[in-house]
Image (cartoon, rainbow, N blue to C red):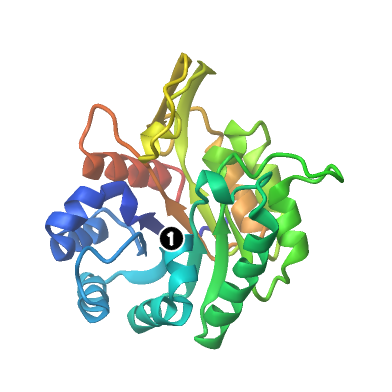
Amino acid sequence: MKTLPVAVQVYSVRDDAERDFRGTMKKIKEMGYDGVELAGLYGLEPSEIKAAIEEAGLVALSAHVPFQDLVADMEGVVDQYAQIGVKYIAIPYLMEEDRPGTPKFEGNIKLFEEIGKACKKRGILTLYHNHDFEFVKMEDGRYALDYIYDTIPADLLQTEIDTCWVKVAGEDPAAYVKKYTGRAPVVHLKDFHKEGKPGNMYELIGTQVEKTESQGVFEFRPVGHGDQDFPSILEASVEAGAQWVVVEQDQSIGRPPMEAIAMSREYLKSQGW
């Protein structure tokens, strides 16, 4: 089977990147990764980020850029990432007040399109990175995630399917990737283990949530070490015309994050990737 280059979302090793960005990039390359997806600049200038990534022999593939930052200074923020040379900017997460089902949601879709236009001017393609809260039904029965993609033209917004959250939402990740064939340039590989109805899922990605009665277990795991069927996801990524896959592990439990992403890369190598 054809394989694709593999990047890692730097958020997975954010503390290491904060301490020593240049050294962390070198270690990521040594693990066998081909590129990185940024999540912040760690107090460095775009030129320093670009130099460190290039020096390590990696590709600065993409960046997760907070929706609020993009809205506050669209051209300025896009310019920073254009200087680094990323091919994609992903809208990574919506705060509760911005999500489907809120009064702001329709206006936010218009803002996604404006972000797409600002990125396109700089030769960057905008992606939307989903969680599970986009899998609520609109009045016409469509998922909100599909509604976003149906509303905004593909030349302004493409998918970054997060396979973990698709499965958490009750859908088949491989089928969802294939659904967006031709519009799925980057696929997020994320593994997890879930039992029952845990209340801590968003706490684990750094979001403050009201304490709920937890009736289960949820933890992020290295790729290949959880509940996901990765052979089918990898095959679907190739079939859908993806250009890259990106390993992401929001939190590492019981081992250092660098060890966790190394385990993810070793698993993918065992699959011929």
Q: Position of residue 32 (x, y in %)?
A: 30, 56
Q: Is residue 242 above or below residue 223?
A: below
Q: Amino acid at mark 1?
A: Pro
Q: Position of residue 73 (x, y in %)?
A: 43, 76
Q: Is residue 258 left or right of residue 88?
A: left
The one nearer the camera, 75 or 10, is: 75
Q: How many marks?
A: 1
Question: Extreme bottom residue here?
Answer: 121
Taking the image as drawn, is residue 222 in sight?
no
Residue furthest to the right = 140
Q: Badge 1 is on which residue? A: 66
Q: Is residue 231 above or below residue 124?
A: above
Classify 46 as above or below 151: below
Q: Is residue 248 found left or right of 163 in the rendered image? A: left
Image x and y of residue 166, in percent: 61, 40
Q: Is residue 63 visible?
A: yes
Q: At x 84% / y 43%, what residue is drawn?
A: 139
- Residue at (35% x, 47% y) in the render: 265
Residue in the image at 29% along x and 39% along y: 260
Q: Residue at x 16, y 66 (%)?
A: 22
> Which corner quadrant of the image does residue 254 belong to?
top left
Query: Which secondary structure lies at badge 1?
Result: loop
Where does residue 127 sit, x and y in percent of width and height? 56, 64
Side of 258 relative to 106 (left or right): left
Rate crowding at label 1 as few (under 14), some (14 to 19) or many (20 or more) other CA atoms within 10 Å.
some
Q: Relative to the observer, which residue lies in front, 150 or 30?
A: 150
Q: Nearer the viewer, residue 143 or 250?
A: 143
23 and 16: which one is in front?
16
> Quarter holding the N terminus?
bottom right
